[in-house]
């Protein structure tokens, strides 16, 4: 007879707890939240307000005296709480089973195939009010996989998806084994290979060579859709005549994502570890026409290139280390620079990122900005409206307004105070997180052991629940089966 081991029992129990926390509770289509204060990020805060939600969208928001709650809506009455838009993580390498790929050209990969829907990272995100996450591969790359914007809720990858194939990560900072020169050369070569491939397709088409068509058909590619037709190539860097005769399905799938980049149809998240790398990144972006669709992912110290970044009108995602410290080699005097303030003063749009998935999450980074002299509105914008705009989702996330996704967080007080905490999180209009039902926190704070996770003695080792271990007869039977 097959028996569960202690490790298997604990692993199964942890997985069940994770799934319970990740899944939304069942609720009606219509929801209403009555909050003491609503910070909409789309106007002034509303005291004593109501948020109406239906079919996953916000339908109305305003003072309680002006909003009529439908009779069939499920009401959450939170008069002492503060409602804020779900926070937006502009860039994260968490939630995947592999952060970096070994090959230089990986744009044909998709992080969707690597996302783990029951990763503890997503639970932590909900605990700290994050409802939208841009997952991109790590910085040890040349051209990485295509990223995905997700919500931290769901039992399957498809349930997490907000926007698949959402941009591609590139790095001008050298990966292991490369110098700055070879890294830049490898990135330029990727676009050079794309151009050479397209020129070959155009040349074959002029000669009547149908090699590419035969290869596409052999691979089962679909000629019925829009990509089964040719269309002129567009772009602000370089273009190629004759592409109107080349069905897009005949383009090498490994290079096709880069064509989207050149044509300005896919965002590039360009990593620079130092200010010296910013100039090279801007040069490559201009050469290949994706400057307007590029976002910088910056390492600490890149504020020194803020003037060049501002002139190029490129948005930035800041390092989690917001305060850069330099030590003078002669006097040993330390100089500290608050990087967010530098970019703000230069007029560069910026988003914050979490320092970790625990207490130093987005709220902490925003609170740190306030502590360094920024206004509360500016700090909250850097974790709501600014990252939403960078991701191209400004009409859907980051604000509480009619038409936006119904992603709302209820705080017990000031969302930037260490004395407040997330009480409930609504994602798509349904309760995705309820602190009172968080088994992990109840275990930490109250010592309550979640069901099925208590240690088992020898007589209980074969069963999932305490007090229901196998009988002596069952043990004897199992020994006889061996």
Image (cartoon, grey):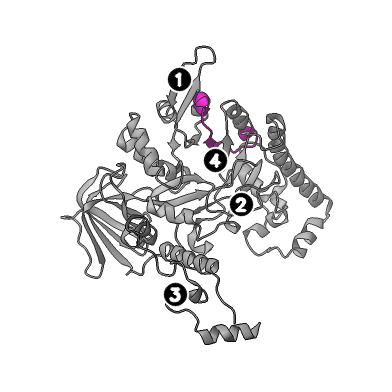
Magenta stretch containing residue 287, yes or no?
Answer: yes
Which residue carries the number 2 mark? 98
Q: CA distance from mark 1 to mark 3?
A: 59 Å
Kindly state the secondary structure of the residue where label 1 is placed: strand
Q: Could you tell me which residue is drawn at 40 percent across and 54 percent down?
A: 126
Q: CA distance from mark 4 to mark 2?
A: 26 Å
Counting from the top left corner in percent of width and height, residue 116 is at 54, 59
User: Tag 4 or tag 1, which sits nearer the N-term?
Assistant: 4
Kindly state the secondary structure of the residue where label 4 is placed: helix
User: Tag 1 or tag 2, which sits nearer the N-term?
Assistant: 2
User: Tag 3 or tag 1, which sits nearer the N-term?
Assistant: 1
The stretch of residues the image draws in magenta is: 284-307
Crowding at mark 4 (Cα within 10 Å: few <14, some 14-19, many 20+) = many
Q: Could you tell me which residue is drawn at 51 percent across and 69 percent down?
A: 9
Crowding at mark 2 (Cα within 10 Å: few <14, some 14-19, many 20+) = few
Viewer-side label of 2, 3 = 3
Q: Nearer the viewer, residue 58 or 122?
A: 122
> Which of the 4 image quadrants contains residue 427?
bottom left
Q: Say which mark, if any, is on residue 465.
A: 3
Q: Is residue 303 above or below residue 376?
A: above
Q: Are marks 2 and 1 in contact (CB under 8 Å)?
A: no
Q: Taking 10 as reference, is 26 left or right?
A: left
Counting from the top left corner in percent of width and height, residue 367 is at 34, 38
What number of labels is visible?
A: 4
Q: Say which mark, if any, is on residue 293.
A: 4
Residue 194 in view here:
yes
Q: CA distance from mark 2 to mark 1?
A: 37 Å
Viewer-side label of 1, 4 = 1
Viewer-side label of 4, 3 = 3
């Amino acid at each position: 007879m097959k028996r569960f081991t202690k490790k298997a029992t604990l692993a199964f129990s942890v997985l069940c707890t994770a799934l319970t926390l990740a899944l939304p509770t069942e609720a009606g289509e219509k929801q209403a939240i009555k909050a003491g204060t609503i910070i909409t990020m789309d106007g002034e805060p509303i005291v004593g307000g109501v948020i109406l939600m239906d079919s996953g969208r916000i339908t109305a928001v305003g003072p309680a005296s002006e909003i009529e709650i439908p009779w069939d809506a499920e009401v959450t009455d939170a008069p002492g709480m503060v409602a804020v838009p779900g926070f937006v993580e502009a860039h994260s390498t968490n939630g995947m089973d592999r952060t970096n790929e070994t090959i230089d050209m990986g744009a044909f990969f998709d992080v969707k195939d690597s996302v783990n829907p029951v990763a503890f990272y997503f639970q932590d995100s909900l605990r700290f009010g994050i409802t939208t996450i841009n997952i991109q591969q790590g910085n040890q790359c040349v051209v990485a996989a295509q990223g995905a914007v997700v919500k931290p809720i769901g039992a399957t990858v498809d349930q997490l998806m907000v926007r698949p194939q959402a941009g591609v990560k590139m790095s001008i900072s050298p990966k292991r084994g490369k110098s700055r020169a070879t890294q830049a050369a490898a990135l330029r070569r990727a676009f050079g290979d794309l151009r050479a491939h397209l020129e070959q397709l155009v040349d074959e088409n002029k000669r009547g060579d149908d090699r590419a068509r035969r290869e596409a058909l052999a691979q089962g590619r679909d000629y019925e859709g829009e990509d089964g037709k040719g269309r002129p190539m567009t772009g602000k860097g370089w273009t190629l005549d004759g592409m109107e005769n080349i069905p897009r399905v005949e383009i090498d799938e490994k290079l096709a994502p880069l064509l989207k980049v050149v044509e300005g149809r896919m965002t590039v998240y360009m990593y620079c570890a130092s200010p010296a790398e910013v100039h090279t990144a801007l040069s490559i972006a201009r050469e290949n026409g994706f400057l307007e669709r590029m976002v910088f992912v910056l390492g600490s110290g890149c504020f020194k290139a803020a003037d060049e970044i501002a002139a190029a009108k490129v948005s930035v995602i800041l390092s989690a280390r917001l305060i850069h410290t330099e030590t003078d080699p002669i006097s040993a005097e330390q100089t500290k620079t608050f990087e967010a303030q530098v970019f703000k003063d230069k007029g560069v749009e910026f988003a914050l990122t979490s320092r970790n998935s625990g207490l130093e999450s987005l709220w902490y980074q925003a609170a740190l900005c306030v502590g360094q002299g920024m206004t509360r509105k500016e700090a909250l914008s850097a974790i709501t409206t600014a990252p939403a705009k960078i991701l191209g989702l400004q009409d859907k996330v980051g604000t509480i307004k009619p038409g936006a996704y119904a992603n709302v967080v209820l705080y017990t007080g000031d969302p930037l105070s260490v004395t407040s905490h997330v009480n409930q999180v609504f994602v798509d209009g349904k309760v995705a997180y309820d602190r009172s039902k968080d088994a992990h926190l109840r275990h930490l704070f109250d010592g309550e052991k979640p069901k099925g996770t208590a240690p088992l003695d020898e007589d209980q080792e074969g069963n999932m629940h305490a007090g229901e271990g196998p009988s002596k007869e069952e043990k004897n039977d199992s020994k006889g089966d061996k």
